[in-house]
Amino acid sequence: MHTLYSWNVNGLRAAEKKGFLEWLAGTGADVVAVQETKAQPDQLSAALRNPPGYVTHWFSAEKKGYSGVGTYSKTPPQTVQAGFQDARFDHEGRALISEYPAFVLFNIYFPNGGRGPEWVTHKLAFYRRFLELAGAYMAAGRPVVLCGDVNTAYAEIDLARPKENGKTSGFLPEERTALGEFFQAGLVDTFRHQHPQAVKYTWWDMVSRARERNVGWRLDYFMVSPDLADKVAAAEVHDDILGSDHCPISLTLDV
């Protein structure tokens, strides 16, 4: 069994003060992917960079205090690629691609389109570039796992107020269509696959204290290539875990 967790921590240094390292140790996970670290590696404590039992890899944005991803692994990956090898995207520190014997893991913080139409365009181009890379691995016979903050709720069940948000980035028709292309390419939304009717959210607006009322969105996903779909033993949303405006999600694979 392989247990993987993914969490948009909304600032890893802030999360450390809220118990992130204790949570990490308690998961027992084989791999933990974090997004929106908002830090360069040299700004992180030694405890965050080298917790007992894990090796870590980081990819940070050129802009300080922005974006960034990190992957904690109990077993060192065979290879790690930082970014998409694409200048349009890689200055933002949004992707780590780690190869393990059983699968290739994409740990990604997808762009948010909320800052205007040009950001929606950028986000959709990022989606397409991800599909090109993931598709190449899948075509070569390599199982793929995608995790991270995709920044789009796919269906009405995936947000508390779909009617009111039809013109809001994160639930725009073009964003939902683009996310649908992930599924057309064969990727399986593991949580929805395991829990077809479950209403669970992974992000809540902090300004309006939406978490207290559970007015949320499911923006964070574990997806797997078709050859892993029947290996999914569990896929969960851990909405009881605090410390960020997102909550962690997990995937257990029988591989």
Image: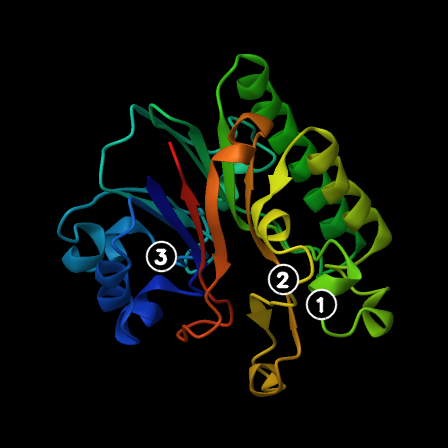
Q: Amino acid at mark 1?
A: Leu
Q: Amino acid at mark 3?
A: Ala
Residue 90 spot, x, y in % from top left: 51, 37
The mark nearer the N terminus, 3 or 2, is 3
Quadrant position of residue 121: top right
The mark nearer the N terminus, 3 or 1, is 3
Left of 169 or right of it: where is 228? Answer: left
Residue at 29 percent of width and 50 percent of height: 29
* Quadrant (top left, top right, bottom left, bottom right) of the N terminus: top left
Task: Tell me the tag on residue 159.
Answer: 1
- Foreground disc of the pair 3, 2: 2
Q: Which residue is mark 2?
A: 218
- Foreground disc of the pair 3, 1: 1
Q: Nearer the viewer, residue 161 or 172?
A: 161
Left of 234 or right of it: where is 223? Answer: right
- How far apart marks 3 and 1 lie (CA) works out to 29 Å
Q: Which residue is mark 3?
A: 39
* Quadrant (top left, top right, bottom left, bottom right) of the C terminus: top left
Residue at 62 percent of width and 58 percent of height: 219
| Residue 131 appearing in the image | yes
